[in-house]
Image: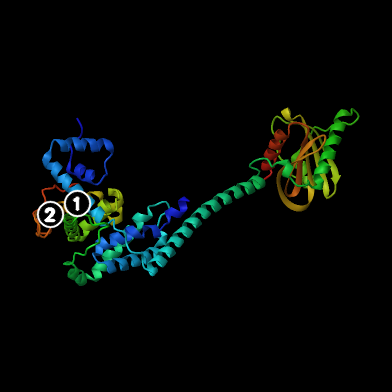
Amino acid sequence: MPDPITEADLLAYIDDQLDPARRIEVEEHLAHDPHAAVRVMADLKDRDALRLLHAAPLPRPAEPMLVAADRLERALGWQEFRLKFRRVAAVVALVGFGWFAHGQVGLGITDSEASPKPPAFVEDALHSHETSLLRARMVSQPEVEDYDPAEILAETGIRLPSLPEDWQVRDAQIFPSRYGHSIEIAIDAGELGRVSLFAAQAPAFDVIAPMPARFDKATAVYWQTGQLAYALTGNGSDKALERAALRLSRKLQ
Amino acid sequence: MNDATRTDVIGLLGPLRRYARSLTRDESQAEDLVQDTLVRAYERKGSFRTGGSLRGWLLSILHNTFIDHRRSHVAEFRRLEQVAFLIDTAAPPEQESRVRLQQVQNAFMSLPDEQRAALHLVAIEGLSYQEAANALKIPVGTLMSRLARARAALRGFEAGADVQPSEARRPSLRVVGGSDA
């Protein structure tokens, strides 16, 4: 049983506001109710008469009206454009911020292809990494496994991050460097293999988020926090090295 | 270009002018009303929501402008109350049907303002109930009861020839969904 046909349905039928299924139900109803049908036909006739009466083309609008309409049209168009532009600008700003944050905070790892020429201390880090590998091979060069960050900090002013628990310090050496001391810590870093953590006093205050610098034999991921520059150098996977450097750099913040 | 049509005010001048004619029942007043509407819409352009219906927005502003005009010109409108102005039909068919059309027009023009506005937006302009209710800032139920009464009045006008529709017998149509002001 369909819903009973109401006055509202008849009204909506005349005004074309019903979906086809309901229209059919209304027509079914009208077929059995001549009284209602007469009334609906009269209303449809009036509706069509009104439409016909008002369908006559209007004379061309007066010039001031066209000017006012044009002004409004432009204003609305401009408004819409600005709104769209603002949305685009917001997206651009967000992307831009992401880019910035990416570079500054190190939300991800910066692509080395786009990275600038690494600072001089990175080269020092690379050399000391090679030296530590050499020392490791040489029996006559004893390695110092005692690693005391507090003492190093007190004596050299260089702050070192706490290392992951599964990292084993194999050697810790203090070298002279261009701007004071530098520290080279040789570490067995689990999956990363033998890595070197290099820390040195930097020539100028700066903040650099971890950046990879690839060399023939090794990759160094370097960063700087204020007066201190760091580099984690190793021969293993670049990505893993970058992640490790990122973790260390965060511990220093 | 979708953007061009969405802010096509010029293209909406026809509907606006027709609606203004139905409301004011006077050609030159209708043109003034549209002009004022365009000025007002420009001043309130910030209230137009992008993606909204430009037609509905403008029809609504036109209606408000008309109400404001009417408040300030009650006397003038009372004088016009007697006038049922004639719009030329596109192509007058036979004499007899022309007379019948004219009767419908006269009946339409003698409807109370609210009923005429509702009937114009729905029957002539083809707005949905919701769009028309939005343009008139009334609930859909109120709109439908105005439509029902307008239709009943038109029917009564034809049946009773010269009987004034306001004094015509109360339509047998039950008022649907909500009361009318």
**Rendering coords of residue A213 (x, y %):** 77, 41
* Point 10% across, 48% down: residue: B172
Q: Is residue A235 left or right of residue B175?
A: right
- Label annotation for residue B158: 2
Calculate the distance from the C-alpha at mark 2 to the C-alpha at mark 1: 10 Å
Whether residue B167 is situated above or below residue A155 in the rendered picture: below
Q: Is residue A200 left or right of residue B167?
A: right
- Label annotation for residue A46: 1
Q: Give the residue type that dot 2 points to.
A: Glu
Give me the chain letter of mark 2: B
**Rendering coords of residue A235 (x, y %):** 78, 32
Q: Is residue A73 left or right of residue A119?
A: left
Q: Is residue B83 left or right of residue A149?
A: left
Question: In terms of image quadrants, where is residue A167?
Answer: top right
Of the pair A16 and B52, the residue shown nearer to us: A16
Whether residue B107 is situated above or below residue B39 in the rendered picture: above
**Rendering coords of residue B88 (x, y %):** 25, 61
Q: Give the residue type that dot 1 points to.
A: Asp
Task: Give the farthest residue toward the front.
Answer: B94
Whether residue A147 is situated above or below residue A209 in the rendered picture: above
**Rendering coords of residue B120 (x, y %):** 25, 55
In terms of secondary structure, where does tag 2 sit? helix
Is the residue under label 1 in contact with that under label 2 (CB below 8 Å)?
A: yes
* Point 12% across, 59% down: residue: B166
